[in-house]
Amino acid sequence: MDLYEYQAKELFARHGITVPPGQVAATPQEARAIATELKVPVVIKAQVKTGGRGKAGGVRLAPGPSAAEDEARRILGMDIKGHTAHSVLVEQATGGFEEYYAAYLVDRANRTLLAMVSSEGGMDIEEVAATKPEALARIPIDATSGVDLETARLLAARAGLPEDVQDAVAETLVRLWEVLVEEDALLVEVNPLACTSDGRVLALDGKITLDGNAAFRHDHAAFADGSDDGGLEARARAKHLNYVKLAGQVGVIGNGAGLVMSTLDVVAYAGERFDGVRPANFLDIGGGASAQVMADGLEIILFDPDVRAVLVNVFGGITACDAVANGIVKALEVLGDARCPIVVRLDGNNAEAGREILSDAAHPMVRVVTTMDGAAELVAELAAA
Ligand SMILES: Nc1ncnc2c1ncn2[C@@H]1O[C@H](COP(=O)(O)OP(=O)(O)OP(=O)(O)O)[C@@H](O)[C@H]1O
Ligand SMILES: [Mg+2]
């Protein structure tokens, strides 16, 4: 789960990293009230889970409360790379600072955790890596030993930070490591990390990606707002379904994680020939694909406005294909109707009987295909139509 900047800053503050005082506002009036309370020039910042807000006009300085209200009015509702700003962070404007960069992340390619610190803050780190690699220190971190003051000082020095700020930055780097470990994050990033002329180190921006697999250990639930997936994952969780929202147009249901993963692959592959359509989700309904589970699964998938065709791909085992076919027929009765075509591929135990049940039911939206590749081809074609 990605956090908003204001949520990331909340976690930073819990671990002793200094952030500018500020609060979130959902209306221009609230922004004005917060600015009035802060009694200083403020920065109004669009809260969206994407980068490049500054360039898009989503970060603005406001010298006083009425300017804060105006800027908030302008930013609220703004679209930034497909993300709507539903709230703004109103925070104290810091003055007189140099901008640096600091991050820890899981480096999957190298099977390690990675620290990245740079003297070039405020800009895209990819750009720094490409144009000024000497200003970016990248040091693998051993998960068991972590980042102590010594390692942190080395990071600050290697990144070419001025000597007089290295110690203060190192302290913040140790705390940032604490955030990664104690909050079970996959990524923590501060850009810019500001060092003020009076010797303070502040996180002026923050990104955190939390590891959902560790959610049970934390009180992070309050951070979830369903904005990433239109609330679909939360709905699915409530029905105990193993569902992950993806960005495509083909709804996918299968039994068994491996089968569903390969279904995603064949759909993406077939989609290359049909307008580049892609899978809209991962959904594994597991072994006992009862009518109710099938109905719950179809309901979630058809609720996703992006879905334009559905592929049900089942390999009958202990739960045989005729039971699954009955499940699909009953599910469609429960749901009343399907708003888009459903392609079904059944194989394995009692596949023939299953296909017969579906052809007898003759549901106008259901198409039966015997092979997985054929089913993927048809569903991609239907989704692109
Ligand atoms: N509280 C603040 N006080 C003073 N300047 C700020 C403050 N917050 C942000 N800024 C300035 O605005 C710039 C952009 O802010 P920020 O990094 O939060 O947005 P961004 O980089 O455009 O967004 P993103 O990181 O999402 O791409 C910063 O580099 C910094 O110079
Ligand atoms: Mg930034």
Image (cartoon, rainbow, N blue to C red):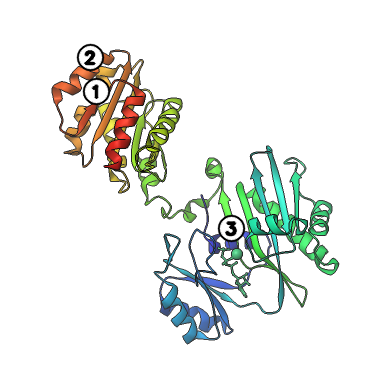
Ligand 1 within 8 A of label 3's CB? yes
Residue 56 location in percent, x, y? 50, 69
Q: Quadrant of residue 273?
A: top left
Instruction: Work out whether residue 14 or residue 135 is closer to the camera in this orientation and state it.
Output: 135
Q: Quadrant of ligand 1?
A: bottom right
Question: In the drawing, what numbered circle is on residue 325?
Answer: 1
Q: Nearer the viewer, residue 263 or 34?
A: 263
Q: Which mark is residue 207?
A: 3
Report the residue at 15% width, 30% height from top.
363
Q: Secondary structure at mark 2?
A: helix
Determine the CA span between mark 3 and mark 2.
53 Å
Report the quarter where the C terminus lies.
top left
Q: Position of residue 322 (x, y in %)?
A: 25, 18
Q: Secondary structure at mark 3?
A: strand
Name the residue located 21 percent from the left edge and 42 percent from the top edge. 339
Q: Are marks 1 and 2 in contact (CB under 8 Å)?
A: yes
